[in-house]
Structure formats: C-alpha cells, structure tokens
Image: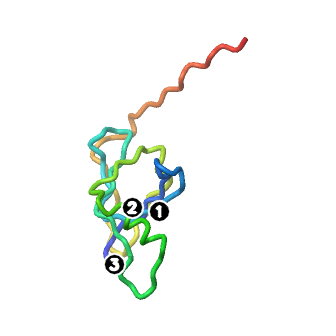
Amino acid sequence: MGDTFYAVTFRDPESGETTRLRARTVEDSSLGLGFVCIADFVFDVAGPLVDPTQEALAARYARVRRLHLHIYSVLAIEEVGEEHSGLEFENDRSKLVLLRAPEEPTE
C-alpha cells in the first residue's frame, strides 16, 4: 500500500454494524453539507494471508464508485501513511446549525 490513505470507521446504514473502510479519497459530498464522500477504496486481498473481513468488504463495495455517508454515521477518519497532507473540505462546516425537534407536551 505504501501511499497515504484514510481509514474511515462508520456505522453501516444497511446492517447498523461498525465498519472500517480504507480509501484514498475523502471529500465533500455533492449531496450537501450533511454528507462526506469516500472514493478510491483500498482492499488488502492480494497477499498470502486471506482476511475474511477484507474479502467481504471488497465484495460488498466492488461496484461502488463513491460512498456518501451522513456525518452522523461517521465515527472516525484516520489519515494513515508517512506522506500525508491532511483533509481539506471546500465547504465551511463551522456554520452548520443543528436544531432540535420541538418536544411533545406530556399529559
């Protein structure tokens, strides 16, 4: 693998399980401020030791070009490698305001 990549830990929207996926690209999603886009997946399945988890992930995401995750499902993004430059997002997320739903009156 040698190069820099990102290890993204998230809750899988289909199964609800915690999943760790490696990718070369993490960027703003075209779906809006509430999403992160992950692309250029990295799977380690070509070695002498076979990791069933990596094989399952490679099969699950074999036909996926870009994965758009809601920011609340992302648990961590780790940049791995010696020559990393850091994540930079185009949109300023500091102005994101979250509003709570009004509480229902209790009787």
Quadrant position of residue 7: bottom left
Q: Name the residue at 42% across, 63% down.
A: 21
Spatial distance from mark 1 to mark 3, Cα to Cα? 16 Å
Which residue is disc 3 drawn over? Answer: 1
Hey, which residue is sitting farthest top in the picture?
107
Query: Which numbered disc covers residue 60?
Result: 2
Which residue is disc 1 drawn over? Answer: 20
Q: Name the residue at 47% across, 62% down.
A: 20
Quadrant location of the C terminus?
top right
SS state under label 3: loop
Spatial distance from mark 3 to mark 2, Cα to Cα? 20 Å
- In this view, the residue in front, 62 or 92, is 62
Q: How is the image coloured?
A: rainbow
The image shows residue 3 at horizontal and vertical percentages of 31, 75
Quadrant location of the N terminus?
bottom left
Three-letter code for the amino acid on which mark 2 is drawn: Arg
Quadrant position of residue 106: top right
Q: In the visual, does 77 lie left or right of 102?
A: left
